[in-house]
Image: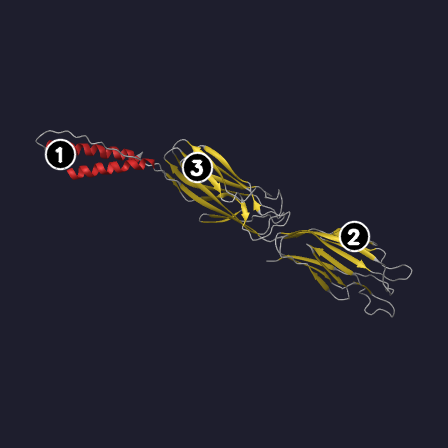
């Protein structure tokens, strides 16, 4: 909107300049200058900001990496409940879509270990997100190690914060509730994309 | 003035193709969590009735009582057996050892048994854990079985105690041994 307003201002000034030019000619002539402007469809998305205020079981945040303090419960050896909010400041100046994706469909063991029967090597989680009055939930259920995504279409321009609440249930694993987790590092990458529908 | 006019029109015309442009933005958030190697061992349970024995759990351990320790007629060690099991789970590599402290059921009040008598009842200890089976025969000194594993395991450590009939009468008194099960995480 700002750029369009600016274009109109430029357009008006150009017409005035033409009038001065024509007044200096012997033969009156008329010229019409059409001033146009455009605003590209544009989305912006800032780096994630993790809200540690209401977080549970979060150890540290370094740049765009969230480290869970204790992914496993030291009594049950299964997963420990975890919660945190992360916001992405965003703007789109047209009807658009926000997509939240999980690269691996859950927090998966980094690999290199044989997983014995009865043990788990992935932790499912949910990522509930809100944006511009809409909401959706990405269910990274760790059923298989593959990408999952959830879109949210917003049929108007919007700006503000995309807020994602990430939640891990106590004892949630890909080998059933309460299964012990194989030792190691677990990882997933959550991606937020804003763009055309 | 004309040059300015021409430049203005050119710039406006260049703006038109950009109308179709769309900018898509994406941001990643990496979520990491570590699961350390942890082990848990539950108190032992008698896994079968054995023979001439009774078992009672006591805290994290327990006591095997050889109820008919000797033949009441000959005073010699009677055949007995016991089997107990410790439920164990480890999320990674672990060290597991089973140690007999005395190396046999020993009458510690007898430093030197009288001629023809024994003051120690030896037994065979067999231990199985995660497809590994180890055994030893006590000989009067401390000895250990190593059942360590390099992978996560869940199951039972089963200990079998077998006392064979003796060929010497045992001196009167109390006989005991302590079997220590030691479980630790290993990296």
- The quadrant in which the N terminus of chain A is found is top left
Q: Which residue is mark 3?
A: A98
Q: Nearer the viewer, residue B94 or B105?
A: B94
- The quadrant in which the C terminus of chain A is found is top left
Q: Nearer the viewer, residue B67 or B3?
A: B3
Callout 3 secondary element: strand
Question: Label 2 marks which chain's residue?
Answer: B
Question: Label 3 marks which chain's residue?
Answer: A
x then y, percent, for residue A185: 54, 51
x then y, percent, for residue B175: 81, 61
Question: Label 1 marks which chain's residue?
Answer: A
Residues at marks 3 and 2, CA–CA distance in whole angstroms: 64 Å
* Dot 1 or dot 3, earlier in sequence: 1
The label on residue B55 is: 2
Q: Which residue is mark 1?
A: A21
Tell me: residue A10, above or below residue B29: above
Residues at marks 1 and 2, CA–CA distance in whole angstroms: 113 Å
Count residues near mark 1 (Cα–Cα under 10 Å), then give few for <14, some for 14-19, many for 20+: few
For image coordinates 26% across by 34% down, the residue present is A7
Callout 2 secondary element: strand
Tell me: residue B7, above or below residue B166: above
* Discs 3/2, front: 3
User: Do the residues under discs 3 and 2 have CB atoms within 8 angstroms?
Assistant: no
């Amino acid at each position: 909107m700002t750029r369009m307003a600016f274009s109109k201002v430029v357009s008006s000034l150009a017409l005035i300049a033409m009038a001065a030019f024509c007044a200096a000619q012997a033969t009156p002539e008329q010229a019409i200058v059409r001033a146009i402007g455009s605003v590209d469809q544009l989305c912006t998305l800032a780096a994630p900001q993790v809200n540690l205020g209401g977080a549970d079981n979060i150890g540290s945040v370094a740049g765009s990496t969230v480290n869970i303090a204790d992914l496993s419960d030291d009594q049950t050896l299964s997963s420990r409940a975890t919660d945190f909010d992360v916001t992405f400041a965003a703007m789109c100046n047209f009807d658009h879509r926000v997509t939240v994706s999980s690269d691996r469909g859950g927090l998966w063991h980094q690999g290199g270990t044989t997983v014995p029967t009865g043990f788990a090597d992935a932790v499912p989680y949910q990522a509930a997100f809100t944006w511009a009055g809409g909401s959706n939930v990405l269910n990274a259920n760790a059923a298989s190690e593959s990408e999952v995504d959830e879109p949210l279409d917003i049929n108007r321009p919007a700006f503000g914060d995309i807020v994602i609440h990430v939640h891990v249930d106590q004892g949630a694993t890909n080998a059933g509730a309460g299964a012990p987790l194989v030792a190691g590092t677990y990882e997933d990458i959550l991606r937020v994309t804003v763009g055309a529908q | 003035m004309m040059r300015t006019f021409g430049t203005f029109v050119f710039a406006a015309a260049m703006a038109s193709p950009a109308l179709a442009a769309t900018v898509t933005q994406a941001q990643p958030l990496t979520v990491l969590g570590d699961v350390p190697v942890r082990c848990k061992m539950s108190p032992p349970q008698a896994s079968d009735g054995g023979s001439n024995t009774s078992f009672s759990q006591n805290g994290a351990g327990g006591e095997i009582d050889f109820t008919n320790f000797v033949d009441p007629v000959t005073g010699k060690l009677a055949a007995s057996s016991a089997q107990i099991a410790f439920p164990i789970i480890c999320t990674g590599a672990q060290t597991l050892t089973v140690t007999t402290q005395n190396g046999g059921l020993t009458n510690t009040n007898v430093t030197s048994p009288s001629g023809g008598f024994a003051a120690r009842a030896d037994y065979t200890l067999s231990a199985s854990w995660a497809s590994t089976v180890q055994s030893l025969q006590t000989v009067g000194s401390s000895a250990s079985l190593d059942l360590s594993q390099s992978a996560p395991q869940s199951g039972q450590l089963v200990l079998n105690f077998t006392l064979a009939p003796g060929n010497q009468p045992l001196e009167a008194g109390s006989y005991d041994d302590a079997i220590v099960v030691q479980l630790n995480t290993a990296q």
